Image (spheres, grey):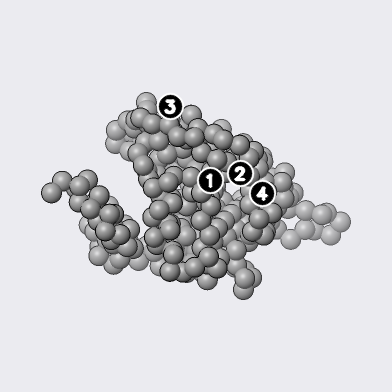
Amino acid sequence: MPKANLQHLLRRWGIYDRLRESFAYDCYQRLRHGRPIGWRHNELLFYRSLLSPYPSELLIFDIGAHRGQRTDVFLGLDARVIAVEPDASNQRVLAAKYHRIGASRVTIVAKAMSDASAVATMWVHAPGSGLNSLSSKWVQALGSDDRRFGSTVEFAGRQQVETATLDSLIDAYGVPHYIKVDVEGHEPSVLRGLSRPVPFLSFEVNLPEFLPEGIECIGIVSRLAESGRFNWSSDCQGGAGLAEWLNGSEFADALSACREKSVEVFWRREPARPGNPG
């Protein structure tokens, strides 16, 4: 049976995404991609260390939740997760995975985040694809670059999706301890919708094509609190990539010199200095 047909049947039976969370799937990833067997556990330890100390009532916004890979990690921290995902196929997967947990642990928001509450166009590579995006530059970049994923990527469809802002999400659910943003090139628009600092946030930067957007995000986030500091990780498996956390201008220089293919940029609000509201 062709691989695509087998995946379709497993998804139809509600098995596929549960298999992806299993030890057997981790072994498969080890054989095919060399991914460490304990990567899920390592990721949990990474976030536990990064976000500490965190409150007993831990709230996390997972922006671009896809099929819940990071949501699973955040649940391992005993967090309450607001999983934001505009793709209808992924919404069904999230609902099937977390219905038994209940609304007290995972809330699924069927929207995209942006800098305004409106309706926007999402370019669709395929239903449920992690490459779907609201960024036209992302579509153009993948359509002309065969190096990042081994071949060029076509976006055959478009879909109108409802958008909201991070500020409106905070108004609805409270101030989170951490906001994770992974929206394939649309990160600046998402962060422009946030007007108040939170203890931690992160955003993805695909290099080198999206270095300008990464620099823009640094500027947007830096204005939230002068005391904020930046770092990065290339895999969220070990510690932070830099030996020390840097201010915005220092980190922009470091990111410009970075030779990683993709990094997760982390920002944390440092305690304000005396006489400085931070």
Whether label 4 touches label 2, CB < 8 Å: yes
Image-quadrant location for residue 219: top right
- The residue that appears at 40% across and 67% down in the rendered structure is 41
Nearer to us: label 3 or label 4 = 4
Disc 1 packing (10 Å; few <14; some 14–19; many ≥20)? many
Identify residue type, mark 4.
Ser
| Secondary-structure class at tag 4 | helix
Query: Gap in Å between the C-alphas at discs 4 and 1?
Result: 12 Å
Amino acid found under the numbered disc labelled 3: Gln
Q: Earlier in the sequence, mark 1 or mark 3?
A: 1
The residue at which mark 4 appears reads as 168
Pointer 2: what residue?
A: 164
**Are there few (<14), some (14-19), or many (20+) residues within 10 Å of tag 2?**
some
Identify the element where label 2 is drawn. Answer: strand
Give the residue displayed 60% in from the left and 58% down from the top. Answer: 178
Q: Position of residue 87 (x, y in %)?
A: 44, 44
For marks 2 and 1, give the CA distance: 7 Å
Residue 232: in sight, yes or no? Answer: no
| The quarter of the displayed image where residue 25 is located | bottom left
Say which amino acid is labelled 2. Ala
Mark closer to the chain start, 3 or 4: 3
Residue on which the image places disc 3: 140
Marked residue nearer the N-terminal end (2 or 1): 1
Q: CA distance from mark 2 to mark 3?
A: 24 Å
Does the CB distance between marks 2 and 1 fall below 8 Å? yes
Cα distance between the residues tagged 1 and 3: 23 Å
Q: Is 262 above or below relative to 53?
A: above
Q: Identify which residue is drawn at 20% across, 47% down.
A: 5
Q: Secondary structure at mark 3?
A: helix
Query: Disc 1 marks which residue?
Result: 111
Q: Position of residue 54 (x, y in %)?
A: 62, 68
* Residue 139 sits in quarter: top left
